[in-house]
Amino acid sequence: MAAIMQFTIANRGGNLSVPKLSRDFLMERAAKMGFANPRFLARADLGPGESKTLYIDRFTQLVDTSTVPLVEGGNVPYTDFTIDRETLLVDTYGIGVQFTEDVEVYGTMKISPRIRELLGINWRRVQDTLAANQFKATPVRMVPQGTAAAPTFNFTLTGAFAGAATRDVQAEDLIEARAYLSSVLHAEPFPDGYYYVIAHGSAIAKFRRSTTFREDMRASQFVRQAFIEGEIGVYEGCRIFEDNYQLTRVLGTTTNQGEFVIFGRDTVFYGEITAPEVRFNRGEASFNLNKALAWVGRYGYQLAWADQTGAATAGRNTGIYVGST
C-alpha cells in the first residue's frame, strides 16, 4: 500500500488575491451555509478603517397605542424610545494549504481543485461555528419535559436550561416555541412572514411523527417556489432547516433527542471588514515550485440583545434555544 504523501514547505514569495476565484469560492458555497446563511443574519455595514470593536445600534419598540384613539382636534402624542449599542468583535480568520508543483505534475489527480474544495468546506464550517455560537447564546431557553402524551415546556430567560429533558422533542415543542416567540417575546418575523427554525436531523425525525407536520411538509413542497438549501418545508408559520453539524443529536446529558433553534429577524448580526477571499502564494523564491492556497477574511458575528438576560422585553430577545442540561 502506497504511503500518503504530506508536504510542508517554507512560506516564500508574494501573495496574490484572486478576485474571480474568490467570487466563485463564495457564491458556490453561500447557499450551503447553515447558521451563517446570509438570509438568517442582519448585516452591519462596515468597511476598511473600522476598528476591531464595532457597534450595533439597537432600537426599542414604540408604545402600543391601540387602546388610545386620537381625539378630533387633538395632537398626535409623542413617546420616547431609546437607542443603545451592542459590541461586535471582528477578527481575522483563515487557513492555507501548501503543496509543490511536483504534486501536480506527478500526481494522479489535479491537486488545486481538491484544495479549493477543502478550503471551501473549512471556510463554511468556521463561519457556521461562529454564527451558531451566537444563536445558541440567546438568554431564552426551553426544555422539553413531561411525557410524550402530556408534554410540558420549561421556558427560562436566564441563559441556562432549567433542568433536564424528560422526553424527545416533538411537533408540539415547535408549536409552543413559536407561540412564545410571537406572543411573549413579540419577535418580528422575517420579511417573508415566517420565523426560521434550524433543527438537528434527530429533531426533524421526531417532528415527522406528527401527522399534521408530515402533511404540511408535503403541501409546502407544492406551494413554495423557492427553497434555501437545507430547507425541508414550512410548518406552523416556520421555515424549517436541517443542520447536523452545529446542533447535537441528544438533548444535553440525557438520551433524549434533538436540539433546535427558532428565531425572528435581527437576532444575530454579521459584521465584515474584508470579505473572505482566496489567496495564492506564488512562491517566487522557488520559481513557483512551492505553492500555497489560502482563504482569509476579517469578520464577526454577534447576538443583538446578548445583555437582555432575564428580560422578556418586546422585540429584544428574538431567538429560543431548545435543549437540556
Image (tube, rainbow, N blue to C red):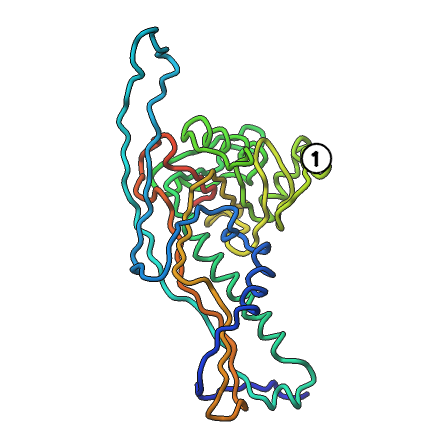
Quadrant in which residue 298 is drawn: bottom left
Where residue 138 appears, as percent x and y from the top left, is: 39, 43
Quarter of the N terminus within the rendering: bottom right
Where residue 286 appears, as percent x and y from the top left, is: 49, 93
Mark 1 closeness class: few <14, some 14–19, many ≥20 residues within 10 Å? few
Q: Residue at x 53, y 48 (%)?
A: 255
User: Hey, which residue is sitting farthest top in the picture?
Assistant: 72
The residue lying toward the viewer, choosing from 32 and 159, is: 32
User: Hey, which residue is sitting farthest front in the picture?
Assistant: 73
In this picture, is 107 found above or below 147? below
Where residue 25 appears, as percent x and y from the top left, is: 57, 65
Q: Residue at x 41, y 63 (%)?
A: 274
The residue to which callout 1 is attached is: 223
Q: Is residue 209 left or right of residue 244?
A: right
Q: Amino acid at mark 1?
A: Val
Where residue 244 appears, as percent x and y from the top left, is: 57, 54
In this picture, is 272 found above or below 280? above
Q: Is residue 182 left or right of residue 224?
A: left
Q: Residue at x 33, y 56 (%)?
A: 89
The residue lying toward the viewer, choosing from 271 and 36, is: 271
Number of disc labels? 1
Q: Is residue 163 left or right of residue 176?
A: left
User: Hey, which residue is sitting farthest bottom in the picture?
Assistant: 286
